[in-house]
Image: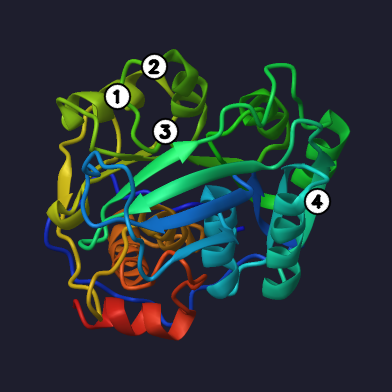
Amino acid sequence: MSEPGTDPDLDPDPDVDPGPDLDFDDSDDIDVLVLGGAGVDTIVYVPELPLPLADSHMIRPGIQTRAGQTGDFVALGLHRLGLRTHHLDMVGADPEGELVRAFHRDQGIPLTEVHQPAGTKRAVNLVDPDGRRLSLYDATRGHDADRLPPETVKALAARSGHAHVSLTQPCAHALPLLHDAGVTLSTDLHDWDGRDDYHRPFAYEADVVFLSAAALDDPERTLRHIAEHGRASVVVATAGAAGAQLLTGAGAEPVHIPAVTPPAPVVDSNGAGDAFAAGFLYAWLSGAPVRTCALYGAVAGAYACTVPATRTDAIGRDALLAGVAGLA
């Protein structure tokens, strides 16, 4: 891999060069190893959120179950952008596991699965007409003692230039092995409130940290806390239509990244954060300036909001480059 780009000065209004020829080092045969986050979602469209209390609701356009949780979507986003992507996670011998395996076969994304006796991760996503989402995760699909086999992690990391570590159990236990392998790390803390201890190993051990500002009282304070207590050179807090805040070190000033107008009507916010991470990493791993990386992420995230949760899709390289070029 090229040396990851960091832009400590972060000119608030740089000339944006979309870089049509982003180059990647061929010394590794996996550009990005994605750990965790494989699972199945059941999508339920509801008339509004919060859902009014009633004996029943008639649901249209229906209820659909499909493979695709955070690790699946990050892997898909990176794969569609041309990066050699490999996914590692625990998957059950159940119907949900078959959906996950079929997803990876159909998309052409290599999957190394470790048997999960408790079953494949699953969730129910309630989606309102404005595309807002409420997710209900099945907490029974895993145990505290779950581990990814160390030899498997080390063998895949040795072939990789970078690892994106999902927030799901048991990925935190793989962080020391990934550091020993010398790969750079990224993670997504999702809607961390800045206090839950479960998120801290991910927040402090990654080089690039993504999170949502949805549950943060003071996003800037949380960004600085992560930069001060961890190893991150880049911390990004996304806030949907309000854009994102970008910090490149505890002593730097946060930079606001405006939201990008989606290329079609917004139908669902599901997967927008994963798409942002994939677009950002695509540019960051090429050595692009951090501000440019954030614009790549914003374009990819905006595209994801136009894709119904019942359909699996991610922006391609040509569309991403054109979208960033249009912002210059």
Which mark lies nearer to you, 3 or 2? 2
With respect to residue 263, does 146 lie above or below? Answer: above
- Left or right relative to 39: residue 214: left
Mark 1 lies on a secondary structure that is loop
Q: Are marks 2 and 4 in contact (CB under 8 Å)?
A: no
Q: Earlier in the sequence, mark 3 or mark 4?
A: 4
Quickly name the residue at label 3.
232
Task: Return the x and y of residue 148 as percentages of the image width and height.
Answer: 77, 32
- Left or right relative to 173: residue 153: right
Number of callouts in the render? 4
Residue at (55%, 40%) from the top-left corner?
Answer: 166
Give me the C-alpha separation between circle 1 and circle 3.
18 Å
Residue at (30%, 63%) from the top-left corner?
Answer: 292
Q: Which amino acid does label 2 sit on?
A: Asp
Give me the C-alpha separation between circle 3 and circle 2.
18 Å
- Within 10 Å of disc 2 (Cα), the crowding (few <14, some 14-19, many 20+) is few
Q: Are marks 2 and 1 in contact (CB under 8 Å)?
A: yes
Q: Nearer the viewer, residue 241 or 279?
A: 241
Q: What residue type is labelled 4?
A: Thr
Residue at (31%, 58%) from the top-left corner?
Answer: 269
- Within 10 Å of disc 3 (Cα), the crowding (few <14, some 14-19, many 20+) is many
Q: Which quarter of the rendering shows the C terminus?
A: bottom left
Q: Which amino acid does label 1 sit on?
A: Asp
Quickly name the residue at label 4.
112
Task: Return the x and y of residue 315 as percentages of the image width and height.
Answer: 44, 75
Q: Earlier in the sequence, mark 3 or mark 2?
A: 2
Q: Which amino acid does label 3 sit on?
A: Ala
Quickly name the residue at label 2.
196
Q: Which quarter of the rendering shows the N terminus?
A: bottom right
Give me the C-alpha separation between circle 2 and circle 4.
30 Å
Q: Nearer the viewer, residue 321 or 39?
A: 39
